[in-house]
Image (tube, rainbow, N blue to C red):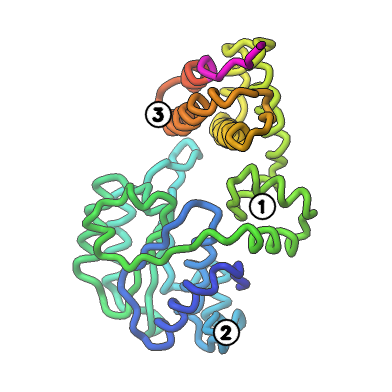
Amino acid sequence: MMLQPWLASPWRVLADAIASGRIHHALLFASPRGYGKRALADAFANALLCQQRNADGSACGTCRSCLLVAAGSHPDLARVTFEVRDDGRPRTELTVDQLRALGQRLSLSSQFGGWQIALIDPADAMNASAANALLKTLEEPSTNTVIALIADDPSRLPPTIRSRCQKIDAPLPTREEALAWLRTRGVDAAVAAATLDASMDNPGQAEAWLAEGALAVREECASDLTALSVARARPAAVAERWAADRPDLRLWFAAALARDEARSLAGGQRGRLGLTRRAEIPKLNAWFGRANLARGLLATPVRADLVLLDLLRGWPARSTS
């Protein structure tokens, strides 16, 4: 498994731990989505179970264990993630039954006579009962057993769980590293730069958005905000359209556009969205914060169109002087 270049440092820590056999019983892979922590956790699990690791500590990919991992049938690798409900839709949280079953599984001996590892992803989606069940397992770790928690927002995990884990950070790459990596993925330099701008320099998110054609959505958001600033569009109409098509993504882009507009005005330049006065900077900064709060509200039962309407009504108007 080829890891992104900026993961070399945390990988070295993990590879050295495997080589020495001194591995913490609970690891927390934590970073924003898109930095590569899931690839890092998978590489660690594969290497831990591999029977003939490469010189750099990575899994060979050809031994019996590696083939079973690739097939999703290794008996000493457990994955805990969202289950499917009776209606065919995935759950939105990890349940207590899942974590109790994991604890029972890990209490048994390894079937291959070596390490056992469990990947819990996303660990920050455990409900309170599930977290308590996991805590019991962490308090009485089994020999040669590792539990790896993967979390986009580790602050949502109880402190009692975080304190029992060794944290493994997936760092944000430099812009140069991210651009070079996207180029190796076959992305044109100009497109890579534009997508990194949109993703706030998050390379994994940039790649995903390129695959989804998300830059077109960003352009729509920019056009809508420009139209709102000169009253060519009504907030209610824009809110209705945004609510019907990927509202969370549109709010991300809108927040990023507000941030970029404020930066342009602070640098003495005309904003892309047509705002010209430096006096708009505090309003844009406040709107940026409200847009991120609105993204959180989208995960609640509150109607998305009403959340968006309240936000869009506060978009700054362009000066006519």
> Quick check: 319 above or below 213?
above
Taking the spot 26% from the left edge, 75% from the top edge, the residue there is 142
Amino acid carrying mark 2 in the image? Cys
Is 279 one of the magenta-colored residues? no
> Quick check: 147 above or below 123?
below
Whether residues under marks 1 and 2 lie with C-beta atoms below 8 angstroms apart, the answer is no
Nearer mark to the viewer, of 3 and 1: 1
Q: Bounds of the magenta span?
A: 312-321
Residue 52: x and y, percent? 53, 89
At label 3, counting other C-alpha atoms closer than 10 Å, the crowd grade (few under 14, some 14-19, many 20 or more) is: few
Q: Secondary structure at mark 3?
A: loop
Q: CA distance from mark 3 to mark 1?
A: 28 Å
Amino acid carrying mark 3 in the image? Thr
Is 320 one of the magenta-colored residues? yes
Label disc, if present, on residue 300 of the rendered structure: 3
From the image, tell me which residue sits under label 1.
207
Residue 249 visible? The answer is no
Taking the spot 64% from the left edge, 63% from the top edge, the residue there is 177
Nearer mark to the viewer, of 1 and 2: 1
Residue 266: x and y, percent? 58, 35
* Quarter residue 186 falls in: bottom right
At label 2, counting other C-alpha atoms closer than 10 Å, the crowd grade (few under 14, some 14-19, many 20 or more) is: some
Left/right placement of residue 134 relative to residue 268 reads left
Q: Secondary structure at mark 1?
A: helix
From the image, tell me which residue sits under label 2.
63
Taking the spot 44% from the left edge, 77% from the top edge, the residue there is 14
Amino acid carrying mark 1 in the image? Glu
